Image (cartoon, grey):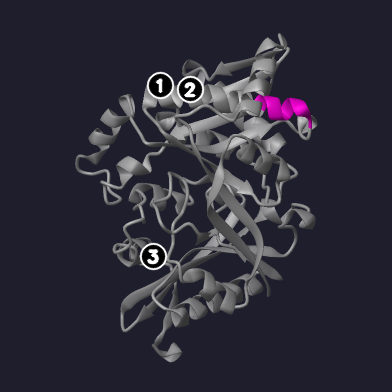
Amino acid sequence: MAAEQIQIVPVRTRAEKREFVELAYRLNAGDPNWVPPLRDEVYGLLNPKKNPWFGHGRMQLFIARIAERTVGRISAHIDDLALAQPPEQGFGPGTGHWGFFEAESEAVARALFDAADAWLRAEGMTRSVGPISLSMWDEPGLLVEGFDKPPTVMLGHNCSAYGEWVERAGHKGVQDLWNYDLKIDQEMPELTQRIVAMGEKAGKIRVREADKSKFAEEAALLLGILNDAWSDNWGFVPLTDAEIAYAGKKLKTIVFGDLVRFAEIDGEPVAFMMTIPDLNEKLAEFGGNLLPFNWARMLWWLRAPKVRRMRVPLMGVVKRLQSSRTASQLAFMMVEYIRRASVSKYGATHGDFGWVLASNAGMRSVGEAVGGTVDRVYRIYKKAL
């Protein structure tokens, strides 16, 4: 496939955006471990009128064609809030991003990277970090280990060749994101159980369920703790009030009170853990569409979901308690209480804990202490422009 045959087209029209979105469904159709995302979700993510990320970010989509056939796609985007972060935390001034990458061949991939690099340079960027689609709160990282099974909800899956293509295009790995797999239909390790028991005896600690009748307040509380807890993490970009409201609206139908726990010390909320059933077990049947009748099937299933696997996408302890014994104790207590509910009420046997930054020793120790093993690794790359 000669490079001169490849045409790179900036996405301008509705039809071109449709090409951009639909390509992923065609290229991944033969992969039994790829779970088609809901098209409405993908279009919503890319829509400046719906996604509040565009309140502080700008983006250019590109598609690649050969003889009028769509053969690749990529985004180039800039987040003003990421530009304002300290460079030692991964982003900072001059850092642009790429994402939503798909390609039929390495030649197509190289042409797409060249187009994304050129757009970022023209916007004044001096380096790129990706894939980030669109932010660290969405689906960051390229899968480089763990291609043998479908991902759980809110985790990505891609062609195993992409890693080599990205690296040969000049991108170097800068951060890995680890996903832990753990068997939850058995008790946690004995040491962890003892720590939980000690916390239960401490009268100042209370672990409570989320109150869905006060969903907006609980969501704001959770995401407020998250902004504080993650503020020193690599790649952190704060969620705005609009993004908190947007995330709460999207999560409301898939959040269950007994799967979201807040830890309080002397009545003050200082930590949380959010777990969700693996919607991918159901979404795999839908082919990316809720219409005409899949929406009803999904709503019916969500009334009392039974799943094999749960996922912990978000967890946090306020910064002032991090690196303390109390932080670990709170984490283990929340894990244990949610583990019990996941098994007894939802029939789950396994859990996913992650992603976790490879550089975050504290969270890695929690994942290992509860019996988890790393089963998927996502990699984020950097490249000087």
Mark-to-mark CA distance, 3 and 1: 42 Å
Res. 163 mark: none
173 versus 65 height, above or below:
above
Residue, disc 1: 344
Secondary structure at badge 1 equals: helix
Q: Disc 2 versus disc 1: distance between alpha carbons?
A: 6 Å
Residue 88 percent location from the top left of the image:
79, 56
Q: Which residue is at a point 57% across and 79% down the rendered structure image?
A: 168
Q: Nearer the viewer, mark 3 or mark 2?
A: 2
Q: Is residue 245 above or below residue 202?
A: below
Question: In the shown orientation, is residue 234 left or right of residue 300?
Answer: right
- How packed mark 1 is, by other alpha carbons closer than 10 Å (few <14, some 14-19, many 20 or more), is few
Circle 2 SS class:
helix
Which callout, 3 or 2, points at the residue further toward the start of the chain?
A: 3
- Asked if labels 1 and 2 touch by Cβ distance under 8 angstroms, the answer is yes
Image quadrant containing the C terminus: bottom right
Q: CA distance from mark 3 to mark 2?
A: 42 Å
**Magenta stretch: residue 328 in it?**
yes
Could one spot residue 31 in this view of the protein? yes
Q: Amino acid at mark 2?
A: Arg
Q: Earlier in the sequence, mark 3 or mark 1?
A: 3
Q: Position of residue 235 (x, y in %)?
A: 68, 52
Residues marked 3 and 1 touching at CB (< 8 Å) = no
Residue bearing the label numbered 3: 20
